[in-house]
Image: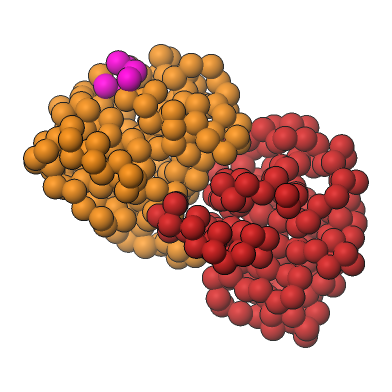
Chain colours: A red, B orange
Amino acid sequence: MARVLVPFAEGVEEIEFVAVVDILRRADIEVYTASLEGREVTGRSHIRIQADAELGSVMNQHWDMIVLPGGLPNAHLLRDDVRIKTLVQRLHEQDKTVAAICAAPTALAAYGLTTGRRVTSYPACRPEMEELQPSSVYSDDAVVEDGFLITSRGPGTAVAFALRLVARLCGEDKAGELRQAIVA
Amino acid sequence: MARVLVPFAEGVEEIEFVAVVDILRRADIEVYTASLEGREVTGRSHIRIQADAELGSVMNQHWDMIVLPGGLPNAHLLRDDVRIKTLVQRLHEQDKTVAAICAAPTALAAYGLTTGRRVTSYPACRPEMEELQPSSVYSDDAVVEDGFLITSRGPGTAVAFALRLVARLCGEDKAGELRQAIVA
């Protein structure tokens, strides 16, 4: 069974976080939510969510995918946490999938992982994405896949993003089945 | 400022709950989340969410709208709670908006509020909706408005549902502005 890590911190965009966890769990993927510190996280719209664990206690486990949700300051806190950088680089070296949505793709750009890759992000983050990695190819598509990277734009694209992650881990048939089950 | 109550209980569909709270709060609407009991609720996909209050402590306040999220057993727990029935009937009598998504429109049908109204629900709930209120007019649209009622289908229609609630409370321009801000 695939194991997916979703780290998150204060200011996380709740729809982006929940759409990924909910839809991947519906696909019987083992999803772990891990806060950077403490167990309760308050999202950008003031919804308080309990993490399954603190990041420190699970980061050395085996993961098949890491997904970075957006929302501020969450995306910046993730970007600036050396454990997240270490995890993302480790998954990249292991040819695992690294995914990010909204403001979080800027973390992947800051780590140097978007060089020469097709990517997207929250529209307002485009200048930062291009300044960090001038050789990346910015797309306005709702969800963009390029090799080990999957990126997406915002709360309104979060369901499509999550379905794409299911397709990557479980195949298109499973993603199609879920799309129907959630009326997407 | 409009005040909206979102009651919820064990098994709530997390995307439906969060999309409504997040998007309405982005519109500067005052949204209160109220659990039927206790303060922590575990959703259908095992995400634990803290309520702002217990229902008993806020149900006699003034509300401009009540929104029932789906997910099981949440939708059945809401339907069977006499306080929810009282609140929904009070808002209906006051010409306020009553909204429900996924399995939750069955509560409105059980209360007799969908008689002769255009409604929708989670597709699998259609037979129950029609059996409870044979005179209701079932629609397959993602979001259905008929007078004081707004109903919708599932997690994949939750963002459109929330934007429709914003349009009802704040007008189409505000909803359009938000649609762009969340990349929907």
Identified at 55% across, 20% down, the residue is: B39
Is A40 above or below relative to A79? above
Is B28 above or below relative to B54? below
Task: Where is residue A81? Give x, y as percent.
Answer: 85, 51
Identified at 24% across, 32% down, the residue is: B108
Identified at 28% across, 37% down, the residue is: B105
Task: Where is residue B84? Give x, y as percent.
Answer: 31, 22
Taking A29 as reference, is A163 left or right?
left
**Dominant SS in magenta:** helix
Identified at 43% across, 29% down, the residue is: B74
Residue A129, by quadrant, is bottom right
Q: Quadrant of the C terminus of chain B?
A: bottom left
From this viewpoint, is residue B20 visible? Answer: yes
Taking A31 as reference, is B28 left or right?
left
Residue B31, by quadrant, is top left
Which of the pair B111/A38 is nearer the observer?
A: B111
Is residue B96 rendered magenta in the image?
Answer: no
Q: In which quarter of the image is the N terminus of chain B?
A: top left
Magenta stretch in the rendered image: B80-85
From this viewpoint, is residue B171 visible? Answer: no
Task: Where is residue B9? Give x, y as percent.
Answer: 46, 26
Task: Where is residue B67? Give x, y as percent.
Answer: 35, 36
